Amino acid sequence: LVLLAQDRTGYGNLSTLITRARMECDRGRPSLSLDTVAAHAKGLFALTGCPRGLVPRRLIAGDAAGARAAAARLHDVFDGRLAIECWDHGLEEERALLEPLIAIAHAIDVPWVVTNDVHYARASGRVVHDVLSSLRHKRTLDEMGTRLRPNAEWKLQSPARMAKRWSHHPEGIQATLDIAE
């Protein structure tokens, strides 16, 4: 999940969640149960996350009903302060999820937004990211295979590039701007 603080209460809850995730888990692997997040959801707005997120992961597994149920649970946890996240890193498997994700957003009456899973600021940062990933996994770059990103699209995208990439879905761009404001 991506959690955005909407106010001081949300910022306090986000700080609590970050602290708990770091203190209660192995170093470098922070995580929390959804029940723990739910106990600190006031003042937070949630995005469903990258393809490894709860909702898209179920779609990838072919469980559309499970994806809708997961989105509905998040809707309840965050009292409607939720948006379905969509991305396009130039991968066909991600593009195949777009329409099902938008359908889920419509089914539970929440907006869907366009994002980019950012792992480095500029495309040139991909090499450093790949090296650091290799070090973390204690493997050479050659041994990493599919653990590395297939292209340099996991960079911070400009607003103009995002608008161009998503020009066929202006409602996603508008919902993204509305939430950012």
Image (cartoon, rainbow, N blue to C red):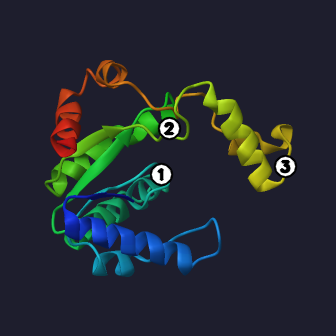
Q: Amino acid at mark 3?
A: Arg
Q: CA distance from mark 2 to mark 3?
A: 26 Å
Which residue does the numbered mark 2 point to in the structure image? 93
Q: Amino acid at mark 1?
A: Ile
Badge 2 or badge 1: first in the primary sequence? 1
Circles 2 and 1 in contact, beta carbons < 8 Å: yes
Looking at the rendered structure, the secondary structure element under dot 1 is: helix
Q: Is residue 181 above or below residue 76?
A: above
Say which quadrant the N terminus sits in: bottom left
Q: Quadrant of residue 86?
A: top left
Dot 3, crowdedness within 10 Å: few (<14), some or many (≥20)?
Answer: few
Using the rendered image of the protein, determine whether residue 32 is visible from the camera's viewpoint: no
> Which disc number belongs to residue 139?
3
Q: CA distance from mark 3 to mark 1?
A: 27 Å
Q: Quadrant of residue 100?
A: top left
Q: CA distance from mark 2 to mark 1?
A: 9 Å
Q: Is residue 137 above or below residue 16?
A: above
For residue 102, side relative to residue 118 (left or right): left
Q: Residue at x 22, y 50 (%)?
A: 105
